[in-house]
Image (spheres, rainbow, N blue to C red):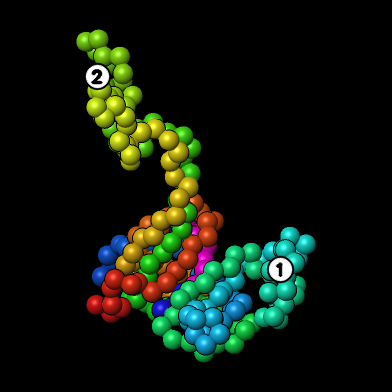
Amino acid sequence: MKGLIGKKLGMSQVFDEAGKITPVTVIQAGPCTVVDVMTRDRDGYSAIQLGFGTKKAKNVSKAMLGHFQKAGLKTELPSVVKEFRTEKDPEVELGSVIGADTFKADEFLDVTGIVKGRGFQGVVKRYNFNGGRYSHGGGWKRRTGSIGQCEFPGRVDKGKKMPGHMGNVRRTIQNLRVVRVIPEENILFVKGAIPGPVGGTVALCSAVKKTNGK
């Protein structure tokens, strides 16, 4: 499984040779530095640990500072670190750089990000409830309505849709097609929308439910 860390730059559209418009999300995919390599003999599983972005050394803990130094990183330290599982032990060197050319056009990706936070919201915005009537004595308008039972069992069911915190959670959009790759600028054009605001960090990996090229 191939993986990269990137940043959402915004949305745009591209035209194919027939003039058809395709909505795309522009992602800066990399460059990512190989921070660590996990092998089955040493760690019990196969994975590659990548770093993305930059952070000042004074803002990095001593533990992570020593971890980065093993990969030869001393000045430009990554601000985001993430592991990507692989089917077999990866054949990459510590400190090497991986860019957007890891993926090709027409491949399919799974993109993971943190959706925008909406704060505390009611059920109308959070779950698209209809709400109550605004006339003929209706006094509940945008309220929840009945949420419990009578004497038995006399409690609110677990998982009941109620007002609460909305957004700011991890979401994955699967089977997004790569429309175009600009390797010299580490830019990917992915069809459709992805989670998170502009400037948000996203994780890109090969689609697990779709075979590339089909």
Q: Which residue is mark 1?
A: 63
Judge whether residue 119 is colored magenta: no
User: Does 5 appear in magenta?
Assistant: yes
Quadrant location of the N terminus? bottom left
- The three-letter amino acid code for the residue at tag 1 is Ala
Q: CA distance from mark 2 to mark 1?
A: 58 Å
Within the image, what quadrant is residue 11 found in? bottom left
Which percent across, then down, holds residue 52?
A: 59, 69
Tag nearer the camera, 2 or 1: 1
User: Which callout, 2 or 1, points at the residue further toward the start of the chain?
Assistant: 1
Tell me if 212 is positioned left or right of 49 in this view: left
- x then y, percent, for residue 44: 49, 81
Local SS, label 1: helix
Picture mark count: 2
Q: Is residue 12 left or right of residue 70?
A: left
The residue shown at (51%, 54%) is 198
The residue where tag 2 is placed is 133
In this view, the residue in front, 68 or 147, is 147
- Quarter where residue 172 is shown: bottom left
Q: Is residue 104 above or below residue 125?
A: below
Magenta stretch?
Answer: 4-10
Q: Secondary structure at mark 2?
A: loop
Q: Residue at x 31, y 20 (%)?
A: 141
Residue 117 x %, y %: 48, 44
Residue 136, given in percent of the width and then of the height, sits at 21, 10
Instruction: Look at the magenta stretch and give its main secondary structure.
Output: strand
Q: Quadrant of the C terminus?
A: bottom left
Numbered circle sitting on residue 209: none
Q: Is residue 102 visible?
A: no
Task: Examine the rendered structure and indicate whether residue 78 appears above or below residue 154.
Answer: below
